[in-house]
Amino acid sequence: MTNSTYALESKDSSTYEEGYEIFLKRSNFRERILSKFEELSVDVRTKVPLKVFDVGCGNGEMTKKYLQLLKANPEHIGLWLTEPARTSLEFAVDNLRKEATVVYAEETFPSTQDFDLIIASYVFYHLTPDTLVNLSKQLKIHGSMAIMMGTSDNPFKTHPGLVSSANHGSTDKLQPILTILEQTSDFKISRHKVETLLDINGLKNDLGLTDEGKMLLGFSLNKNYSSLSEKALSAVDEIYAEAFEKNAGKVKSIHEIIWIQRLK
Ligand SMILES: C[S@@+](CC[C@H](N)C(=O)[O-])C[C@H]1O[C@@H](n2cnc3c(N)ncnc32)[C@H](O)[C@@H]1O
């Protein structure tokens, strides 16, 4: 495991890293999510000083980009970070020194604080939905929480031949808690979908998926690529065929930002 990658204990980290690197090079999900975040965070930008909490910050690469979009003087941003992968957390703290004052960097959640902004970027896969209730209580009145996550609209996870082997969640799992929060009328919730594109050109030849193609599939399913089943490998043929037929070798999937504002 290198410092620049995420540590996820549940899988073979080296193959996950490689798959993730391929995914980052071939997907536009970061730029799409960041541009939506910029639009949604207009109100947050009017607040100074800002108390920001990033849950599961990983190596801090995305945190850095979110913070830069707040366009605040780094001295005016107090930053709380949690990340169970210690090496990633240490890397994040170094990575973020120029962007904010890091007040808290631990493996566990801080005791209750009033935050202006809570960021949960691609982390709710690992958290139980009721964590959302606790986090929402840590918002200041008029504070906001941004939850970024993939939706169930992803062919690599929902194709009938892959669905049983995919073990990544989607925003669907949060819906019951979002309904409860809305019913309290203490929170305003809006959901913002963005379409992302993954370029799969060159990842398949006459012999089937290349190693790179398998690593990407392993990453998408949260599985070690060297143990992918024949069933999974052949299910991918249909996804590839459709992508080339309809979309010049690009696979579409929908990601989402759930924006929760505390009203009272
Ligand atoms: C896909 S990465 C996302 C990292 C970063 N937030 C981003 O957007 O790039 C998921 C992160 O969640 C972390 N994680 C796993 N379990 C967690 C937990 N119980 N609480 C907080 N973070 C957790 C992982 O270690 C990993 O760094």
Image (cartoon, rainbow, N blue to C red):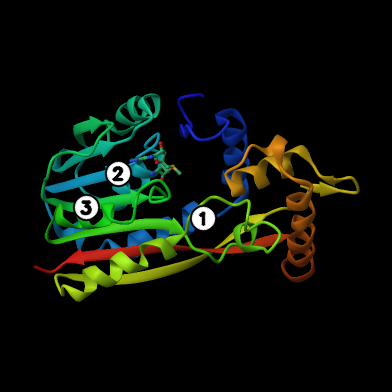
Q: In the rendering, at what x and y percent does residue 85 appear?
A: 38, 29
Q: Is residue 244 shown above or below 111?
A: below
Is the shortest distance between ligand 1 and the CB of mark 2 under 8 Å?
Answer: yes
Q: In the rendering, at what x and y percent does residue 233 appear?
A: 77, 50
Nearer the observer: mark 1 or 2; the answer is: 2
| Residue in the image at 29% along x and 46% along y | 67
Q: Which mark is residue 135?
A: 3
Left or right of 58 on screen, residue 215: right
Q: Which residue lies under the disc numbered 2?
A: 55
| Residue in the image at 34% along x and 64% along y | 258
Real-space CA distance between mark 1 and mark 3, rounded to the nearest whole angstrom: 25 Å
Quadrant containing ligand 1: top left
- Label 1 or label 2, whichever comes before in sequence order: 1
| Extreme-front residue of the structure | 164
Q: Say which amino acid is labelled 2.
A: Val
Q: Is residue 8 shown above or below 180?
A: above
Real-space CA distance between mark 1 and mark 2, rounded to the nearest whole angstrom: 19 Å
| Residue in the image at 26% along x and 37% along y | 81
Q: Which residue lies under the disc numbered 1?
A: 29
Q: Say which amino acid is labelled 3.
A: Leu
Q: In the rendering, at what x and y percent does residue 204 appear?
A: 81, 49
Real-space CA distance between mark 3 and mark 2, rounded to the nearest whole angstrom: 9 Å
Left or right of 84 on screen, residue 30: right
